[in-house]
Every structure is written in structure tokens, then in C-alpha cells.
């Protein structure tokens, strides 16, 4: 008969304690596979607990697969050989610290992370309290599939004032991240369409499209953006591009090429351009580049943007602006989807925009990144790196290109940099097909580089270039 003490069970209920005791005996093989467990009544009598307690413990063990029952015969220990073969993962506290320490030592020039000091925590917390106080009824109502009207109104006003984009709030669809919105677009535009993306380009876009089993073609870019001749030859229906700041090359598509692309879209029914305007807020020189949506007279452009570049990479709120004729189709075909951003976040962000905090934040961050970029470029040009490097496309977005004179292959250079404590990527890494071509051009995302790390970046790159 199984015997366990119930003297010191802590915060566990009686059935939880019994469940854990039996589970421990099974895992340690004190109870063997196929052994019959005591009946609920006999075990409750032996342990001095209720039958319900034993019944709940047995039910939990059955649901997790440790035991099974045979009607009118009883409860038996299941074969958990596969479970017992899984090695126990031990993660001592000191090993966690060492891993974090190692990761902190690496300077990341690939990812875009917001510094703790740059997020407006106090303002965001104030607005959250206000939302909890004054929007309680609205917080308990399911959001429309396109997002709450208050946020869409705020976004529409921001687009009008900042990007000179004039749209109706109903045209705006809010979602948790651009990847989610891409998936909605595939369903909206059709799985039978051919989707074209930039080559080289942001690899996750291709991954999203291919995961939906649609044909995705990589169209090479030239020094003005997507090649029109290559686009025409691809027989594509939908073009996905970032004309205001291409990633990774950093180039800006000039107005002449934009009109050519709009001409391509207008030639055939069902063609569309997805304009990804992901970091247009951070143009460092002059005014923001006008969007393609501004000059689109044929309702061919679907405009997309996100708040995770301007606010924080962890705030997964993005939006797209659909042409009016697609809005009708969207609500007809896809209105069964629930909005993937919580009401609480939507109302907080709406207040952040409406009360002028977003504009102030963008202005402050643009100044901050401008200073950071200038500081890094100044240190590069005043160091011995200057003779062996050329800085390209530094006036828009949060990264620039560093052309480096080196005999090393791009992948060898990146690997050596990583071993030296610097995470860096080359433009070669962003081609769909691996190529032996070495661009010797590397992406410098300076948004995550701290002031104290700037000198170390110079030292690492210098050591690599001037190595013996």
C-alpha cells in the first residue's frame, strides 16, 4: 500500500501533493510499469484523506499519461520509457549569469533594439492608468476586426500631418506585427497570385509568403530600386518593396522609378504594390521621402507601417492602408478574424498619438539617432579605417552601409568579427540563393550601439583589416 506524509505540504492542496508523490515514485521507478495502484477507497482510508482527493490526483496522473484505468479493474502504471529517456536539464543560476554576460559582450550591429533610456515609460504608464480609469466599458467590448476606431482615427491624422497621406480611418487595418498583415494580404489578394520581392531583401518577407504556399519571385534591384524589365519578365501580380529606404542596401527609389512601378501596376487588373514604409520617420537629412501612396491615382498601392521601429521592437502594433475597393472585399471575406492587438494597447497608443507624445518622441529619437550616427561616422572617418572604408546611404533609416577594402570573403569577415565580439552582416547574406559573390559591403545598424561600444567597434574592425 502506498504511504505518504501530508504533514508539510506547503501551499499545495491535498490532491496536488498526492499527485506529486505518486508521480515521483513512478519516475524513480519505485512503482513499476504495469503495477496496479490501490483503489480510490482503499488509498483514501490508508492515508486518512477523502476519496475525492484520491480521485482528483488519479485524474491528473491519467491526463498526463502516467497511469491509465481499465473499467471495473482499476488503475495501472503506464509505460513512460520515452519520458524517462529525456535528460534532465539543469540550469544553475551561475550558468544563466555567464550566458547573459557573454551575450552582453557582443556588440550587435544587426538587430534593432530600443534602449531602456529611450522608451517613454513614465508617459506610457500615465496613459495606461488613464485608459484603465476612463475606458473601462470599451476595454470589455471586442475590438472590430480592423482595430478600434479611436486608434485608426489617430493613425489617419498622423499620416495626414506627417506623411501627407490622406485616407479614411476605415481604410486602416491594425494588426500585431507586419508578418500577420502579410498573411491577411495573401488571403485577400489571392493564393493564385505571384508575389515579387526585392533581391537582396529582408528574408522574413519571403519566408512569410512561401509559408502560405504562394509563388514568390526575387526581383533584382539596381541603383534605383526594383528593375522594371526584370519585374515585367517575372509575370508577377503583387510587388512588395520598401521604396523610402531599402533593406539592406539603404537606397531610395527616385520619383521616376516610382511612376514606372505605378505604370506597371496599372497595366493589368489585379496588380498591386505593397509599400513597406517601415522606418520612414528616421530620415536624417531633409523632409521624409513622399510615399508612393501619395502619387497613386489608380488605387494600386497598399501602404504598410509599424510602431516597433519608432517606439520599441517589442511593441507589436502595425497597420496597413487598403485602397477603398479592397476594404469592401476585406470586410466581406475576412471580417471573421479578430483584431490581434488588445483593446488596452490600442487605446493607450491612440492617446499617445492624439496627445502629441508620439510626435515629440519621434523628434527626440530622430535627434538622438542623428547624433549617434554622426558620432560613429566621425570616429570611423577620423580613424585609420578611413583609408579602407567608404560610408554609403547614411541619410535615411537606422542603418548605413560600410564598404570595406578587404581580401576576406564576406562570410569569413562576419565570422571573424563574431569571434571578436561584433555581430555584423554583409549584403551578400540577404540574397535568396547563396552566392560566391562578395560585395564587401556590410550593414551597420547603429540604433543598438551604445556610446561606450563605439570605440570597440572601431578597434575590432581595425584589428581585422590590419591583421597580419
Image (cartoon, rainbow, N blue to C red):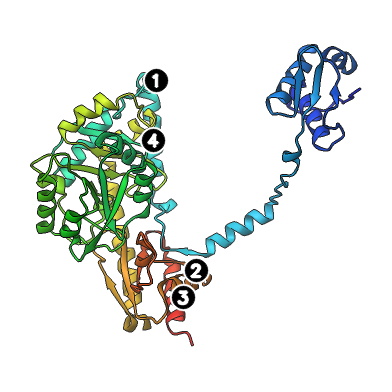
Look at 26% across and 62% down and name the residue there.
250
Q: Mark 1 or mark 4: name the one nearer the start of the chain.
A: 4
In front of the other: label 1 or label 4? 1
Res 168 visible: no
Marked residue nearer the N-terminal end (3 or 1):
1
* Label 2 sits on residue: 418
Q: Quadrant of residue 109?
A: bottom left
**Looking at the image, do the residues carrying marks 2 and 3 touch, with CB atoms under 8 Å apart?**
no
Q: Residue at x 35, y 50 (%)?
A: 206
Tell me if mark 2 has few (under 14), some (14-19) or many (20+) residues whose alpha carbon lies within 10 angstroms of its own: some
The nearer-to-camera label among 4 and 3 is 3
Q: Residues within 10 Å of mark 4 (few under 14, many from 20)?
A: few
Residue at image mark 4: 126
Whole-Å distance between the Cαs marked 1 and 4?
Answer: 20 Å
> Relative to the observer, which residue lies in front, 151 or 402?
402
Which is more N-terminal, label 3 or label 2?
A: 2
Q: Secondary structure at mark 2?
A: helix
Structural crowding at the residue carrying mark 3, measured as other residues with C-alpha within 10 Å and reported as few (<14), some (14–19) or many (≥20): some
- Quickly name the residue at label 3: 460
Residue 113 position within the rendered picture, expressed as x and y whole percent measured from the top left = 41, 54
Task: Give the secondary structure at mark 1.
Answer: loop
Which of the two labelled residues, at mark 4 and mark 2, occupies the earlier sequence position? Answer: 4
Say what secondary structure mark 3 lies in: helix
Q: Are marks 3 and 1 in contact (CB under 8 Å)?
A: no
**Which is more N-terminal, label 3 or label 4?**
4
User: Gap in Å between the C-alphas at discs 2 and 3?
Assistant: 10 Å
What is the C-alpha distance between the residues marked 4 and 2? 41 Å
Marks 4 and 3, how far apart in space?
43 Å
Residue for badge 1:
140
Amino acid at each position: 500500500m502506498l504511504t505518504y506524509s501530508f504533514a508539510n505540504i506547503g501551499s499545495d492542496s491535498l490532491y496536488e501533493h498526492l499527485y506529486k508523490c505518486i508521480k515521483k515514485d513512478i519516475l524513480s521507478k519505485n512503482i513499476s510499469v504495469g503495477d496496479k495502484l490501490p483503489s480510490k477507497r482503499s488509498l483514501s482510508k490508508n492515508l486518512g484523506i477523502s476519496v475525492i482527493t484520491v480521485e482528483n490526483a488519479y485524474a491528473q496522473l491519467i491526463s498526463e499519461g502516467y497511469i491509465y484505468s481499465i473499467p471495473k479493474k482499476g488503475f495501472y502504471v503506464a509505460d513512460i520509457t520515452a519520458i524517462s529517456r529525456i535528460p534532465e536539464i539543469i540550469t544553475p543560476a551561475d550558468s544563466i549569469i555567464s550566458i547573459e554576460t557573454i551575450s552582453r559582450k557582443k556588440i550587435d550591429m544587426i538587430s534593432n533594439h530600443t534602449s531602456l533610456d529611450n522608451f517613454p515609460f513614465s508617459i506610457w504608464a500615465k496613459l495606461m492608468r488613464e485608459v484603465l480609469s476612463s475606458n473601462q466599458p470599451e476595454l470589455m467590448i471586442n475590438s472590430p476586426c480592423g482595430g478600434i476606431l479611436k486608434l485608426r482615427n489617430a493613425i489617419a491624422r498622423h499620416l495626414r500631418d506627417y506623411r501627407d497621406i490622406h485616407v479614411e480611418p476605415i481604410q486602416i487595418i491594425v494588426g500585431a506585427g507586419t508578418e500577420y498583415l502579410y498573411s491577411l494580404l495573401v488571403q485577400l489578394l489571392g493564393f493564385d497570385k505571384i508575389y515579387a520581392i526585392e533581391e537582396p531583401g529582408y528574408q522574413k518577407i519571403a519566408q512569410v509568403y512561401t509559408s502560405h504556399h504562394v509563388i514568390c519571385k526575387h526581383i533584382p534591384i539596381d541603383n534605383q530600386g526594383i528593375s522594371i524589365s526584370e519585374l515585367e519578365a517575372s509575370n508577377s501580380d503583387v510587388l512588395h518593396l520598401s521604396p523610402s529606404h531599402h533593406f539592406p542596401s539603404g537606397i531610395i527609389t527616385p520619383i521616376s522609378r516610382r511612376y514606372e512601378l505605378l505604370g506597371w501596376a496599372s497595366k493589368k487588373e489585379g496588380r498591386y504594390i505593397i509599400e513597406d514604409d517601415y522606418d520612414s520617420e528616421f530620415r536624417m537629412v531633409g523632409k521624409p521621402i513622399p510615399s508612393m501612396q501619395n502619387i497613386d491615382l489608380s488605387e494600386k498601392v497598399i501602404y504598410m507601417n509599424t510602431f516597433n521601429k519608432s517606439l520599441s521592437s517589442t511593441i507589436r502594433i502595425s497597420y496597413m492602408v487598403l485602397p477603398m475597393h479592397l476594404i469592401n472585399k476585406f470586410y466581406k471575406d475576412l471580417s471573421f478574424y479578430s483584431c490581434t492587438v488588445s483593446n488596452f494597447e490600442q487605446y493607450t497608443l491612440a492617446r499617445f498619438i492624439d496627445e502629441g507624445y508620439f510626435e515629440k518622441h519621434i523628434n527626440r529619437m530622430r535627434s538622438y539617432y542623428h547624433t549617434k550616427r554622426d558620432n560613429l561616422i566621425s570616429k570611423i572617418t577620423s580613424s585609420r579605417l578611413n583609408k579602407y572604408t567608404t560610408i554609403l546611404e547614411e541619410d535615411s533609416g537606422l542603418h548605413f552601409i560600410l564598404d570595406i577594402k578587404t581580401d576576406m570573403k564576406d562570410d569569413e569577415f562576419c565570422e571573424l568579427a563574431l569571434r571578436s565580439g561584433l555581430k555584423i552582416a554583409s549584403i551578400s547574406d540577404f540574397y535568396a540563393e547563396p552566392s560566391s559573390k562578395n560585395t564587401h559591403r556590410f550593414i551597420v545598424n547603429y540604433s543598438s550601439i551604445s556610446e561606450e561600444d563605439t570605440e570597440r567597434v572601431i578597434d575590432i574592425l581595425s584589428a581585422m583589416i590590419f591583421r597580419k
